[in-house]
Amino acid sequence: MIYLDYSATTPVNKEVLDSFNKANLEFIGNANSLHKLGLNIDKLIHKATEQIADLLQVKEKEIIYTSSSSESNNLAIKGIAFKYANRGKHIITSKLEHSSVTETLKYLETLGYEISYVNNQENGQVDLDDLKKLIRKDTILVTINAVNSEIGIEQPIQEIAQIVKNYPCFLHVDLTQAIGKININLQNVDLASFSAHKIYGLKGISVLIKKENVLLEPLIHGGKSTTIYRSGTPAHPLIVSMAKALRLAMENGQEHYTYVKNLNNYLKEQLKKYKDVSINSNEICIPHILNISIKGVKAETFLHALEEKEIYVSTKTACSDADSSSEAVYLLTNDLEKSKSSIRISLSYLTTKEELEIFMQVFAQCYKNLKI
């Protein structure tokens, strides 16, 4: 098997799984209980949260645990929208966001909120001048992802943050595809979301960073937890495993980035040999994602041809509608055919050069068969 769908989810690191198992087996009880077992778990959670806070250079009380990045994004956006509705109902976003952001905003529109979409430059990055023009007195939130999940476009988050901080509105950044891959300074970011299963952790645990000056209306009420903003029994084994996954991901970040970049360069050189292959990911995309289109071949058809040889890629982000074209590819290329035939190849430090050599051999055969 050759796995090239790391942006959808990553395999669990054994060290992370060991931490999860140890916390499950050795710490029995509910963190909300007042007896010794509960207090011991509470201390364990505190230690894990402290580690995450140190790694991200935020305060421990600014960390909210959720079940997924989708929940984190929903809590950030709806939480701001409902808490600050008296200030205004205007929200700014881009057309390159994950469906958990775009669908949440569409829902808010049904409640009377106004959503503005900032223009993108030719390379896919947010037009900063247009962003400045869009911010109004009644703007309460700007939500932009750090890295697009389909093409890998990296947004200038620091520049965006510098603009937003001059206005009485908040900035939410979806870090799901960025965490552990690129460095992000959260100093001027008000809210940030990311998930463990994108960084070799377990599914079912994610984080929302909420700066202490920001208030939210909770989505889940009832019961003590690690924070008033998300009720429920704390999943201490998942929390401990999240801390381990984040530490390991950030420990060798630069080394892994360089390694993946070399793999990405190799793939691009090989794919450029095919006249009907277009490389959609550009120079400002992170190397972990390489999006291509194959002229005259449906994306799903090529995906399943590779799958027959136990090579796994994706057509789009895993949470998107499988039957639709890629909005991200269309926005970047303005080419409907490319948006319907795009394939996402996502790489990892676990990917080997030998795997990519085999991938290219199989790719050549599939290309030949399907282009006839």
Image (cartoon, helix red, strand yellow):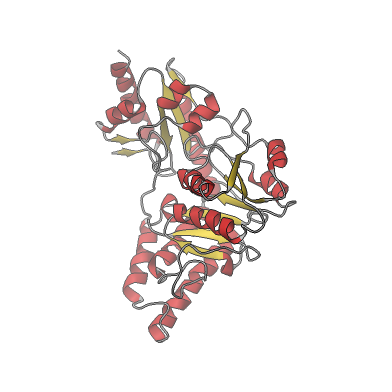
Residue 52 visible to an observer of this rendering: yes
Q: Residue at x 72, y 50 (%)?
A: 137
Q: Residue at x 48, y 62 (%)?
A: 219
Quarter of the figure with the C terminus? top left
Residue with the most extreme right position: 166
| Quarter assignment of residue 365 | top left
Instruction: Identify whether 172 is placed above or below 42.
Output: above
Instruction: Identify whether 342 is placed above or below 52.
Output: above
Rendering coords of residue 335 (x, y %): 49, 21
The answer to whether residue 98 is left or right of residue 121 is: left
Instruction: Identify whether 91 is placed above or below 87.
Output: above
Give the number of marks: 0
Q: Nearer the viewer, residue 18 or 20?
A: 20
Instruction: Identify whether 244 is placed above or below 145.
Output: below
Q: Residue at x 46, y 53 (%)?
A: 69
Quarter of the figure with the N terminus? top left
Residue with the most extreme left position: 308
Residue 270 visible to an observer of this rendering: no
Rendering coords of residue 76 (x, y %): 54, 56
Q: Residue at x 45, y 56 (%)?
A: 71
Residue with the most extreme bottom position: 35
Rendering coords of residue 195 (x, y %): 46, 54
Q: Nearer the viewer, residue 35 or 349?
A: 35
Q: Nearer the viewer, residue 227 or 123?
A: 227
